[in-house]
Amino acid sequence: MSDQLNHIANAIVAPGKGILAADESVGTMGKRLASVNAESTESNRRDYRELLFRTGVMRDHISGVILYDETIRQSSDDGTSIVDIIKNMGAIPGIKVDTGAKDFALHPGEKVTEGLDGLRERLAEYYELGARFAKWRAVITIGENMPSTACISTNTHALARYAALCQEQGLVPIVEPEVMMNGEHDIETCFKVTKWALTELYSCLAQQRVALEGTILKPNMILSGSQCDHQAGIEEVAEKTVDCLKQTVPEAVPGICFLSGGQSDLDATAHLNAMNQIADLPWRLSYSYGRALQAAPLKVWGGNNDNRSAAQAAFAHRARMNGLATDGRWSPELEKEAAE
Ligand code: 13P
C-alpha cells in the first residue's frame, strides 16, 4: 500500500507538472462566476471546469486535479464522466474532503476545519469514484494574539487524523495548513507562524503513524502580509520559503505543491521559479494553484461557451509558465513571448 501511495505522490510532482485546484465549493464557485457576470448553475459550473479539463496542456503540465463533491459525480453532455476526461488527459483525479473552515469556538477570528465524522466511508466512496488523492485545508490567521496555540494544535491534529484515514483507504493525503496572507504583518511573522504550524503538523503526522512518503504538503509561501507597508521581493520570498521548509519538512516527503493564496498570477509563477533555482532541494517543489491557474481562463470564458478556445489558450499559457517554474526555467521574457 505505501509503495502505491509513494508512486502516486511522485507522479503528482513529476518534472514540469503540478496540480490544478478546481475544488471550489458551490458557494465559492458562485462568487468566482459572479465576478465574471456568469450565473452559478450546475451546468455552468460543469461547462467551465470541463473546458479546463479538456485543454491539451493538461497532458504536459497538470498531474492531478482536485475536484469538489459535485464535480466528481458529473458527466459531460457526450456521456463521458468528468473523472474519465481527466484520466484520459493522463492526470489523476483528486477530491476535497474537508467540509469547510468553521468559526473556532471561544476563539473569535479563528477557524477550525471540520469533516472527520464519517470520513472513512466518504473516502471509500471517492476511491470507488476514481479519486487517488485527497485534500484538507486548515486556515491559520495572523492577527492580534493570533494564531492561538489552540488553533494550531486543533487544526494540525485534524490534518493528521485526516491523513491517516486517507492512507488507510488508499488515497494520498494532501495536507494543507494555510497561513493566510491577509494582514499587516511582516514577512518575519509569516515565517515564524508557518514554522510553528509545520513543526506541529509533522509532529502530529508522526504520532498518527502517517507514512510521509505517501503524502504531499500544500503550504503557503513565506510572504509579507498583503496590507504590510514593506513588500518583500521575489528573491527574499523564495529564500525564506525554502529556509522555513528546510527547517520543518522531513526529506521523506516527496513533494511540496504550493497554494497561490491570492498572489497575482505572475508572482505565484515567479516565486516558484526562484525557489527552484536554489540548489540541492530535498523535495520537488511544484504548484497546486486554484486562482493563479484559473483567474485568466475564467475571465476570458465569462460564462459564454463561444469563448471556450480563447479560455483554453489562457489556461494553457498559465499552466506552461508554471510548468517551466517547476524546473527554474521560467523568465519574464518567456512570459511575454509566449503570451504574444
Ligand atoms: P489558491 O491557489 O487559489 O489559493 O487555491 C488553492 C487551494 O486549493 C486552496 O485550498
Image: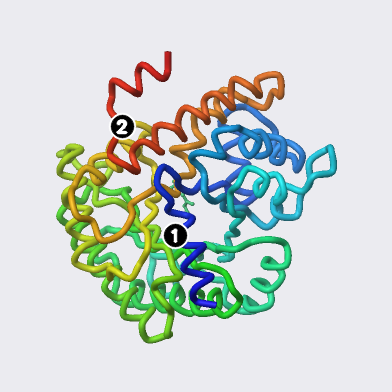
C-alpha separation, residue under disc 2 versus residue under disc 1: 22 Å
The amino acid pointed to by label 1 is Asn
Is residue 97 in sight in this rendering?
Answer: yes
Percent position of residue 279, x then y: 18, 50
Q: How crowded is the residue under tag 1: few (<14 C-alpha within 10 Å), some, or many (20+)?
A: many
Q: Earlier in the sequence, mark 2 or mark 1?
A: 1
Percent position of residue 294, x then y: 51, 36
Q: What residue is at 41 percent from the left and 38 percent from the top?
A: 323
Is residue 109 in sight in this rendering?
Answer: no
Q: What residue is at 29 percent from the left and 51 percent from the top?
A: 221
Q: Nearer the viewer, residue 75 or 56?
A: 56
Percent position of residue 172, x then y: 52, 67
The amino acid pointed to by label 2 is Trp
Residue marked by disc 2: 330
**Location of residue 134 (image quadrant):** bottom right
Question: Seen in the image, is 29 located left or right of residue 329?
Answer: right
Q: How crowded is the residue under tag 2: few (<14 C-alpha within 10 Å), some, or many (20+)?
A: many
Question: Seen in the image, is 178 located left or right of residue 173?
Answer: left
* Label annotation for residue 10: 1
Q: Nearer the viewer, residue 219 or 103?
A: 219
